[in-house]
Image (tube, rainbow, N blue to C red):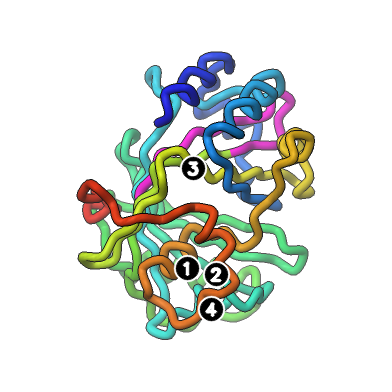
Amino acid sequence: MDPLIDKSLTHFTPLGLDDLNGKAAMLERLDNKYIIPATRLRPALEAFSKYFDVLEIDGKRAFTYATRYYDSVDRSAYYDHHQGRRKRCKVRIRRYVDAGFSYLEVKLKDKRGMTIKKRLKVECGLTKLDQRCMAFIETCHRDLYGEPLGQSLLPVIEMEYERITLVAKEGGERMTIDTALGFQVDDASRDVLPDMFIVETKSARGNGLADKILRGLHLHPTKRCSKYCVGMAALGQVRRHNRFLPALRRLHLREPAWQPKVAKAA
């Protein structure tokens, strides 16, 4: 974590997990993603501190997430996103490292472009999607789209990053700030420069207070900035990735100088 960013967080009022979920669980929302260098993020944090609180658990404000994504053999989840299809589904197991628990998470898009996220708690050591997991995925897909997913899914990429979560003091809006991103597929890995951050705003209409503050600082969303898709493209796991080139260029992905811990994810 950039020490100046860490210092900027001291200006925020802390908020517990239960209060955060009560104010802004945001399992259904419109998202915007911004790729921001530390030098531009610091003044934004000063503005955010007036209107947002920060998630704090046991004195910590930045938490490690380790995530494994699953896709079909033909990478349909990736290509559905690449082609901008409204009906799409991403599946992952996310391990909340500091908290010591894991969730199977299914992310879908509805007809309005709204992100719908469904979660199922799973064992931390789970790597293969078992019958219970597949039944949950099929139910989520059928409930929204009226048909089963009907695909076998296998693990395709792992990633790890640190996340800061902010929630609006008035509720109904939250924001995540991700840094120290690392991607891994087998023995290949890439990481993002430590002074680059992915900021994701989550609000009911996709034009919340955080978006207005960022626009006022001349910061604008980066389209097609899915961490899953960017990681797959960066590690050469897909044939086409032209729509993710702007995000790839802005993130300045590099060969890591350290061995990523993502091999132990989920």
Residue plotted at (36% across, 55% down): 254
The percent position of residue 208, horizontal first and vertical second, equals: 76, 40
Q: CA distance from mark 4 to mark 1?
A: 19 Å
In the displayed structure, 13 sits above or below 149; it is above
Where is mark 1, residue-wise? 137
Question: Image check: 203 left or right of 262?
Answer: right
Dot 2 falls on a residue whose secondary structure is strand
Looking at the image, which is closer to me, 64 or 197? 197
Badge 1 local density, few (<14 within 10 Å), some, or many (20+)?
many
What kind of residue is marked 4? Tyr
Badge 3 local density, few (<14 within 10 Å), some, or many (20+)?
many
Residue plotted at (57% across, 14% down): 11
What kind of residue is marked 2? Cys
Q: Earlier in the sequence, mark 4 or mark 1?
A: 4
Quarter of the image with the N terminus in it: top left
Q: Which residues are magenta?
A: 160-175
Where is mark 4, residue-wise? 79
Where is mark 2, residue-wise? 89
Q: CA distance from mark 4 to mark 3?
A: 26 Å
The percent position of residue 265, horizontal first and vertical second, equals: 28, 52
Residues at marks 2 and 1 touching, judged by CB atoms closer than 8 Å: yes
The percent position of residue 39, horizontal first and vertical second, equals: 56, 32
Q: CA distance from mark 3 to mark 1?
A: 33 Å
Dot 4 falls on a residue whose secondary structure is helix
Residue plotted at (23% across, 56% down): 263
